[in-house]
Image: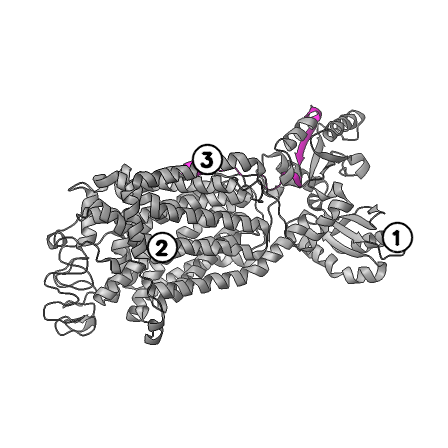
Amino acid sequence: MPAFLHRLGRLAFRRRRRMLALWLALVAAAVVCMTAFGGTGKLDNTFSIPGSESQRALDRMKTDFPTFSGTSAQIVFTATDGQKVTDPADSARIRAALGAAASAPQVAKVVSPFDAHTISADGTTAVAQVRYEVPQSALEPNALDALKSAVSGANQQGMRVDVGGSAFGNAPSESHRSDIIGVGVALVILTLTFGSLLTAGIPVVTALFGVATAIFGALSLTGTVSISSTAQSLALMIGLAVGIDYALFIVSRHRFHLAHGMEPEESAALAVGTAGSAVVFAGLTVVIAMTGLTVVGIPYLTAMGLAAAGAVLIAVLVATTLLPAILGFAGTRLTPGPGSRAMRREQAVGGAGEDAVGATGDSLASGTGENVLSGTGDNVADGIEESVASRTGEIVAGGTGEHVVSRTGEHVAGAAANAAERWFRLVTRRPLLTLVAVVASLGALAWPAHDMRLALPDNGTAPTSSSQRIAFDRVGEKLGPGFNGPLLVLADTSHSSDPATAAQRVAATIGALPDVATVGKPVANPATHTALIQVIPDSAPSDPATKTLVNSIRDDRAAIQRDTGATVQVTGSTAVSVDVAAKLNSALIPFAAVVIGLSLLLLLLVFRSLVVPLKAAAGFLLSIAATLGAVVGVFQLGHLGSFIGVDTTGPVSSFLPIILLAVLFGLAMDYEVFLVSRMRESYLHTRNPLGAVHSGARHSGRVVTAAALIMTSVFAAFLTSDSTMLKQIAFALAAGVLLDAFVIRMTFVPAVLALTRHAAWWLPKWLERRLPDLDIEGDRLGPAPTAPESVALTPSTAD
């Protein structure tokens, strides 16, 4: 693969005008297709689980009870100033508003609170039901606004009108502000990283090309495929983050080559062949993990996984084709200026490489192999590993901090460690203590996850100022929390001798169950011998007691059939939420096993080591657990939620854990590959395990840090969304990347490698012979440029 990517990078560099024209044509074609066949107006935010009990019942209701099969809205009338809704003037105003609501677009039926007896005990609140025959995704763009306008006439002195209900739930999320914020922050970080606005702008430009192609392409399919607004936002979020990061890795390698005198064309080709190989590998892991979400069998989740996978795949294609073309247009202008801080930093990284004064290969003075003087193995002088003369770790007589006289690890006289290497030296000084601190801190952060509650978002987590949230809270306060999420029980009475009596007996049986507030009068369809029974729980839709009630009705179906001859199915938005959570819970463990197993296999192939994959899997589990604990702490327990606009607590979105597993797995592999591959390269060259860890920090630490900060910033920018689900996903991904990059990859990983030493890179000979050599770093393409010896011996002030 490195050789192919090397040729591809060279071709794109030489034919840069054609390559740029090709990508411009692709973006234009995606825009044309979106305009002709799709668009944001056709996004589908409906939850469904094909084959589940709740979905089968909903499908049957479309023919047996069409006015109940679609979505619904609530009109909440609240009398103020000591009045009651039953007062003649107020009731007349309510009836007039309901008449206007009946003529609103797509309204199938309006149920008056005076007929349904949905009036609070104190007479201050009345709730009318507005039923549609279509799901929420099929409502016209202005249907709900038209409903609000129709009833606004009743919103006068002495009465307040709020409109809510399931029709408003899971409303499309707006993310245009978020991507602008994310791009702005990324540009600042890139500018600080490279010290050049031109260099910083290239990853942003190429990422925008990829995101535009992916988003417009996905929106062009909305006319034929169900794609949610959350899927679109997730694809935008991930595509933007990985697009910038992947370009950052390649541009960083390209600039390193330029700083050491390589011609731009060869530099771009070599950067694509080396760093580009790691980009392809990392990108494919994300694609595989995201497409794996399709096996869960939930269309909403399938669309999210495929949209995100498509965005990542396009980001990889952009990084390996369009990016080298852009580098061709930039030419030598990306070379750091002579004497600049950026030039000193790049030359210091290359100059502090693996060769010291008088050293040849891995030898020093009269030493051979890894031996120095009388040392053996990695021992020097007095035989103490990685010590010279004064036995001070990596420091030798006369050395200060990060300076050494002769070859010990990978330092040479006068070569100063950068910030990343200084951090690695700190955490590897007492590796066991570092591991204990990391595990203890992440374990404490993960603890709240043991009490995690999963459910689909409802209006109870909508912004407090929104009409649907006000209506939700008012209904729960005045009529009971269960009224916000009624259950619908579909009874098939075709095998009963007296269908009407059977339906009534079913209602009476359900009414006797715990946590049932009221049971409505059965609505029968004599033609199909079915009856629909509305059940109002005592508890809120997301309360565990409501889930227990759903399961209790289903568990009693055999007894109900024996007593009445009727078969029952439980459905409604609350039952759908219960079924979604159950489906995802059952898929979570197998999916996690596949993801972790895949990581072990891929890292085994890449690093040809047993410890590295096991360490990566353990670190991945720690970061996942800690992230979920942080999500529960913020969104379910309310800790620090006000800082990110969380004004109410509630359950965690049912989709979040499995999405987090898929996305964070791929992103964690990014940092693992880019960081540990440089360690492995150094170890193979020097056979110095601790020095190899420090070398990886010096070569890749700064870029990995910048990449993690960019990705965290992009995800965090989406915390401004009004969608609770998207806000939770954004927080989880931002926290997950931050923890995985800085606590796991930059702290846990070097500590484990320092503790295991040579064993970290060991692989049984029989297994090594059978594994293919993927050559992710492109070693067969030839050695990367190194600084002249004079540069290596010049003290550097760069960090």
Residue corresponding to mark 2: 671
What sort of colour scheme is used for the picture?
one colour
The quadrant in which the N terminus is found is bottom left
Q: Nearer the viewer, residue 388 or 36?
A: 36
Residue 491 x, y percent position in the rendering:
79, 53
Residue corresponding to mark 3: 177
What's the CA distance linking mark 1 and mark 3?
Answer: 57 Å
Q: Nearer the viewer, residue 611 or 442?
A: 611
Residue corresponding to mark 1: 501
Q: Is residue 277 left or right of residue 168?
A: left
Other-residue count near label 2 (Cα within 10 Å), few / some / many at <14 / 14–19 / ≥20: many
Give yes or no for contact between labels 3 and 2 (Cβ–Cβ under 8 Å).
no
Say which amino acid is labelled 3: Arg
Q: Is residue 623 above or below residue 135?
A: below
Q: Secondary structure at mark 1?
A: helix
Q: Residue at x 57, y 35 (%)?
A: 41
Query: Which quadrant of the figure has residue 19?
Result: top left
Within the magenta stretch, is there residue 726?
Answer: no
User: What residue range appears in magenta?
Assistant: 152-181
Q: Nearer the viewer, residue 733 or 202?
A: 202
Say which amino acid is labelled 1: Thr
Residue 438 x, y percent position in the rendering:
39, 60
Other-residue count near label 3 (Cα within 10 Å), few / some / many at <14 / 14–19 / ≥20: few
